[in-house]
Image (cartoon, helix red, strand yellow):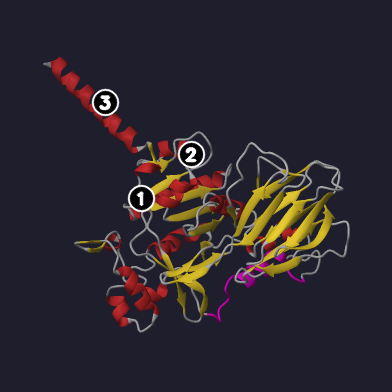
């Protein structure tokens, strides 16, 4: 009898341990439901768009600054809050973060099972991720965007500034509860009583979207379980669609045989850079704009940046600062031999080609970097890079294209949009030397 009780106790203990262990495991993201696609609608008296979910987001990808303990602790705090307050949400982590955190989190998280430091294939991510949240600086946002470099529809990005630079980071981490609620509830109730009471014409647009919402007995799935009132159609999260570059790279000359297929076009949120690298000789780069030859630049390299990237390497190289709402791209030389070659601001729809000239180049290859990621294969003599701005278009279901970034606050046009104040705060325009800003 005592032996039977002992076996029963041991069996229960094994079951209890097994249950606890399974709750702490990292699951493959292939099990997740398909992505919920939001739309972005125009708002009166504001240049930003309004985020509208047809149903609550379910799959949230979290990207943190690497080798940053403060970001790791913030990520853990964020995950626990999401699980307690929004129990229907699935958490996706990068493999390294999942390995580090899943044992300390008493519920499953999702990641890929590959051995590389990536969450999954681009197609899988684009099909599964509803929303991305970043914890770090501008580099962390770029890394999150690069995970969708082959996707046409990028999930909205909610960024918490925890890095050294803050050109792109919108929210302080202390505001994470308010920030996420604003994004999660954006569009909730738009097709219900708020669309009837609100005379704003945007409510009618949101109402058409809400007709496709998945309902349960208690109303829209997920939203009805959140305490408090919905934001309504006019109080949705504000979104800025940041331009991207569409990049195609032909690493070798057209006349040279190659054993590899041409690389498929990818998208860059910040910039594409070609640089002489460790070669001590200047690069000779032929530049074509709209198919017409402009000049042959002799320089350390060239930068083609978006308005978002205009405050990065391009700015350090003397390029212009461009407002993110200006549909353009910036062509900036890096340390050109001729001082007469100045940066150019071009329409985003203008194709630009950079070709490593077959004559005069003493170095046989230059490095290629896209959004801070150095490409495995450089640009050889005769190789070229073709760049054009991605089209951001207005359709029947709102605006499409670009990288949707959730902006802080949602005031009217008369209020500071954050860009002007943030730019002056970071660059300290006209502050005397030695004086603290």
Q: Which residue is mark 3?
A: 14
Classify residue 355 as left or right of residue 154: right
Q: Which residue is mark 1?
A: 83
Residue 216 image position (x, y, % from top left): 22, 60
Q: Residue at x 29, y 59 (%)?
A: 222
Residue 422 image position (x, y, % from top left): 63, 68
Of the numbered discs 2 and 3, the one sitting upstream in the chain is 3
Query: Circle 3 sits in a helix, a strand or a loop, which is it?
Result: helix
Residues under numbered marks 1 and 2 in contact, where contact means CB atoms less than 8 Å apart? no
Q: Quadrant of the C terminus?
A: bottom right
Q: Residue at x 48, y 35 (%)?
A: 114
> Residue 424: in sight, yes or no?
yes
Magenta residue span: 413-430
Residue 429 is covered by the magenta coloring: yes
Cα distance between the residues tagged 2 and 3: 28 Å
Classify residue 222 as left or right of residue 237: left
Residue 396 image position (x, y, % from top left): 41, 72
> Residue 78: in sight, yes or no?
no
Q: Residue at x 34, y 65 (%)?
A: 54
Q: Which residue is mark 2?
A: 95
Query: Circle 1 sits in a helix, a strand or a loop, which is it?
Result: helix
Q: Quadrant of residue 193?
A: bottom left
Of the numbered discs 3 and 1, the one sitting upstream in the chain is 3
Res 377 label: none
Cα distance between the residues tagged 3 and 1: 26 Å
């Amino acid at each position: 009898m005592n032996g039977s009780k002992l076996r029963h106790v041991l069996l229960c203990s094994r079951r209890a341990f097994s249950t606890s262990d399974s709750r702490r495991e990292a699951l493959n993201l292939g099990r997740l439901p398909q992505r919920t696609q939001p739309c972005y609608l125009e708002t009166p008296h504001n240049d930003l768009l309004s985020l509208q979910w047809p149903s609550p987001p379910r799959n949230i990808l979290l990207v943190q600054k690497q080798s940053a303990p403060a970001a790791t602790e913030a990520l853990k705090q964020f995950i626990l809050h999401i699980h307690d307050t929004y129990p229907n949400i699935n958490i996706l982590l990068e493999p390294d973060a999942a390995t580090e955190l899943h044992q300390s989190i008493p519920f499953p998280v999702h990641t890929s099972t590959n051995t590389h430091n990536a969450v999954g294939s681009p197609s899988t991510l684009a099909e599964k991720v509803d929303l991305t949240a970043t914890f770090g600086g501008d580099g962390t946002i770029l890394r999150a965007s690069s995970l969708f470099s082959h996707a046409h529809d990028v999930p909205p990005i909610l960024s918490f500034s925890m890095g050294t630079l803050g050109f792109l980071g919108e929210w302080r981490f202390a505001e994470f509860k308010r920030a996420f609620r604003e994004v999660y509830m954006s569009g909730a109730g738009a097709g219900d009583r708020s669309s009837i009471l609100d005379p704003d014409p945007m409510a009618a647009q949101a109402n058409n979207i809400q007709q496709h919402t998945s309902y349960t007995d208690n109303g829209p799935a997920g939203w009805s379980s959140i305490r408090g009132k919905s934001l309504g159609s006019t109080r949705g999260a504000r979104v800025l669609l940041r331009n991207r570059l569409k990049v195609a790279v032909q690493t070798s000359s057209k006349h040279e045989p190659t054993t590899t297929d041409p690389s498929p076009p990818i998208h860059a949120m910040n910039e594409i850079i070609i640089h002489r690298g460790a070669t001590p000789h200047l690069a000779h780069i032929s530049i074509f704009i709209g198919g017409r030859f402009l000049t042959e630049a002799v320089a350390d390299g060239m930068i083609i940046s978006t308005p978002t990237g205009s405050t990065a390497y391009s700015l350090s190289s003397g390029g212009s600062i461009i407002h993110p709402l200006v549909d353009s791209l910036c062509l900036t030389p890096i340390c050109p031999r001729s001082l007469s070659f100045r940066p150019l601001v071009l329409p985003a729809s203008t194709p630009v080609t950079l070709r490593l000239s077959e004559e005069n180049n003493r170095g046989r290859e230059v490095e290629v970097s896209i959004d801070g990621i150095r490409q495995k294969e450089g640009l050889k003599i005769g190789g070229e890079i073709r760049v054009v701005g991605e089209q951001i278009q207005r359709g029947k279901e709102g605006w499409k294209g670009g990288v949707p970034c959730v902006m802080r606050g949602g005031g009217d046009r008369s209020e500071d949009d954050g860009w002007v104040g943030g730019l002056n705060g970071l660059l300290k325009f006209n502050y005397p030397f030695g004086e603290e800003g």
